[in-house]
Image (spheres, rainbow, N blue to C red):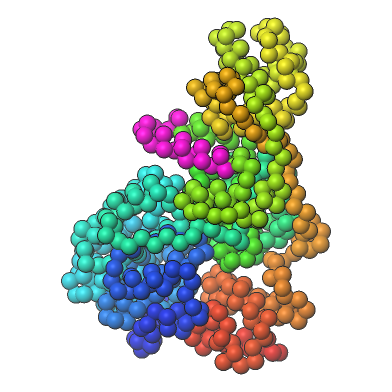
Amino acid sequence: MSALPAADALEALPTQPLTILQEVFGYTAFRGQQQAIVDHVTAGHDALVLMPTGGGKSLCYQIPAIARHRAGKGVTVVVSPLIALMHDQVGALEEVGVHAAFLNSTLSLEDTQRIEREMMAGRMVMLYAAPERVTNLRFQAQLASLHERGLLSLFAIDEAHCVSQWGHDFREDYLQLNLLHERFPDVPRLALTATADDQTRADMIERLQLQDARVFISSFDRPNIRYALVEKDEPRKQLLRFIQDEHDGDAGIVYCQSRKKVEETAAWLNEQGISALPYHAGLDAAVRKKHQDRFLREDGLVMVATIAFGMGIDKPDVRFVAHLDLPKNIEAYYQETGRAGRDGASADAWLTYGLADVVNQRRMIDESPANDDFKRVQRGKLDALLAMAEAHDCRRVRLLAYFGEPSEPCGNCDNCLNPPATWDGTEAARKMLSCIYRFWQHGQQRFGAGHLIDVLRGKQTDKVQQYGHQSLSTFGVGAELSENQWRAVLRQLVALGHVVAEGEYNTLALTDSARAVLKGEVNLTLREAAETPRRGRASKTGKPGAGKAASAPADLTGDALARFAELRTWRAGVAREHNLPAYIVFNDATLADMARIAPQSLGELAGISGVGAKKLQAYGDQILAVLNP
C-alpha cells in the first residue's frame, strides 16, 4: 500500500460531479446515462444500474463517493467479490489522487489495523471489501459506529447479479447484503452489474431490497465487438488460425470448460509460438496470482482459463475472447465476451462448438442437484443460447433481444458479413428421427450419433451387422449426405429440442416435439454444414504468426506511430516503478491521442482525454520530454 495522502490533498478534491470527472479523471463529458446516475446517487438515492462492460460503471459510484465525501458524508463502502479488482481499482484511484483502500486476506495485521483506523476516522473516500467481510459482526459494528457519527456515505454493490440464483454467477455471500438496508436504511445503495435478464433483475431487486430504487438500464450493445460462432472441426487448429490470422501478438482470453483442457490448450499454444498462461481454481493461489499479474501487466499474453478467471478484470486492451466450449447461457456468454474491447477499439468474440457441447450442457443441468424449477429455467436459458448459435440472422439482434433490447442487423457479425447457406432440412430431419424411432421399435435399444449416421448412410459395419440394422427401412436412406452434413443435422435437432442425448454413452432419444416433425407438420430450415469462415483480414504484421508487439491504433502512421511506441516504453517503466498495470497509468487510447496530437505544453496536454490534474502534475513534464526529445 502506498502512503496515505495528506489532509490538504483530500481537501483539494473538487465537489461537483462534472468537475470531478474533468479534473480528477480527465474526461470532458459523461457518457450515456452516467450523469443521471451520478446525480441521482450523489443526492442520496438508491439505484440499480445495468451497464455493459466498458460502459463506465465504476465512475457511477466513484464520483458520488468523492462528491459526498467532500460534502462531509464520510466513507463509501464498495462491495466487490474479487481481490484483483480491489487492487486495480484502489491503485487507479490513488494514481488520480483519491484516497482509497481495500481490506482482504492479502494484508498483514498491521496494514489491516492501519486501514481500519483511517476508515473509522472518516478520512477515507472509498473502502473496498468482499461481501463476507462486509456482513461479518466485527465489520458491521464498525459500520454502525461510522453511521452514528454521520460518516457512512454510500454502499456500492458491484457485480450485483451474484445475488441471484437465476444468474450465471450466484454467490451465497451476496444473500446477506440485505443487512445493509435493514441496519442502515438511510444510507443510499447503488447496485451495479453488466449482465442480467428480466428474471435476474427481479431477483436482485427483491434480495437486495431495492424495490424503491431507480433502475437505470443502458444499451447492452457493444458495437466494437464482432461476434462469430463456428462449427467445431479440429478446434485447436481453428483457434490457432483465428489467433494467427487476426490477433497475432494481441492480448486475449480463451475459455475452456475443464481444468485439464485449460492446461493442455495453454501448453499447446506455447508450442505453436503463442505466449499463453493457464488459469483455473485448481492451481495454487500464488500461481494464479502470478499469471493474473502477468496478464494485466504484460502485452500480448493469452490467458487460457475456466470461468474462474475474468470477472472484474479491468484490462482494457483485450482484443479477443475465444470459447473452445459452449457457455451455459447467454448471460455467461455476454459477460465473458464483454471482457474484450473495453477500450472501445475493435475486438472479437469467437466461439467454436459442436454436438458434444450441447449434450454436455444439457447433461450438467439434468444431473445437477438443483430443484426442478431451477433446472427448467436453466434449460430455457441454454435453449436461448443454442437458438443464437444456430441462427441464420444477425447474432447481435438475437443477443440484444434476449435482454429485451430491440435492434437492427449490425453488419459486423459473422452472419451479417457472411450470410450462412441454409436448406430445407425437413426431409433429412424426418429420416433421422425415423431412424432413432426404428432403433427403439426394432430392439427397445438406443444408440449414439456415430451408429445412427452409419445406418442412415448405409454403411455395413460390425455393429450394424450385430444388431441387424441393415434390415431397417431407414438403412441407407441418407446416403446422399456426408457424415459431416448428418452431424450438422443432428446438432440442430438437439439444439431445437427434438432429440436428447442421455446416459453415459450419449444415446439418442426422441422428445414429444419430434412427433410434429415426423408427421410433416413442421418445416425446418437448417444451416448447411460448413468449414470455419475466414474473413480474409490479414495479420497486422502482414503474415500470420510473425510475432509482434501489441497492436497500435490503425490510424497512427509515421511519426505518430513512433511517438506511440516511445510513450508505451515510458509507460511500462512508470508501471514497473509503481507496481501497477500499465493501463492504470494511461490507457492506450490516451497514449494514442498524445501521439496523434503531439502537445507542446502542459496546457495542451491537459486537454487530452484521460489526463486529470493529478496525472498532469505527476507525469506532464516527462510526457512532454518523450514527445519532444
Point 24% across, 56% down: residue: 179
The x, y position of residue 71, in whole percent, is 29, 81
Left-right relation of 77 to 97: left
The x, y position of residue 306, in whole percent, is 54, 47
The verdict on residue 239 being magenta is: no
In this view, 374 is above or below 248: above
Left-right relation of 611 to 61: right
Quarter residue 389 falls in: top right
In this view, 336 is above or below 260: below
In the picture, which quadrant includes the C terminus? Answer: bottom right
In the picture, which quadrant includes the N terminus? Answer: bottom left
| Residue reaching furthest to the right | 543
Q: Main secondary structure of the magenta part?
A: helix
The x, y position of residue 70, in whole percent, is 32, 82
The x, y position of residue 190, in whole percent, is 34, 64
Left-right relation of 524 to 327: right
In this view, 223 is above or below 558: above
What residue range appears in magenta? 366-388
> In this orientation, which residue lies closer to the viewer: 114 or 11?
11
Left-right relation of 151 to 602: left
Point 41% across, 38% down: residue: 377
Q: Is residue 294 visible?
A: no
> In this orientation, which residue lies closer to the viewer: 588 or 167?
167
Q: Is residue 554 visible?
A: yes
> In this orientation, which residue lies closer to the viewer: 306 or 383?
383
Q: State how many labels appear.
A: 0
The verdict on residue 372 being magenta is: yes
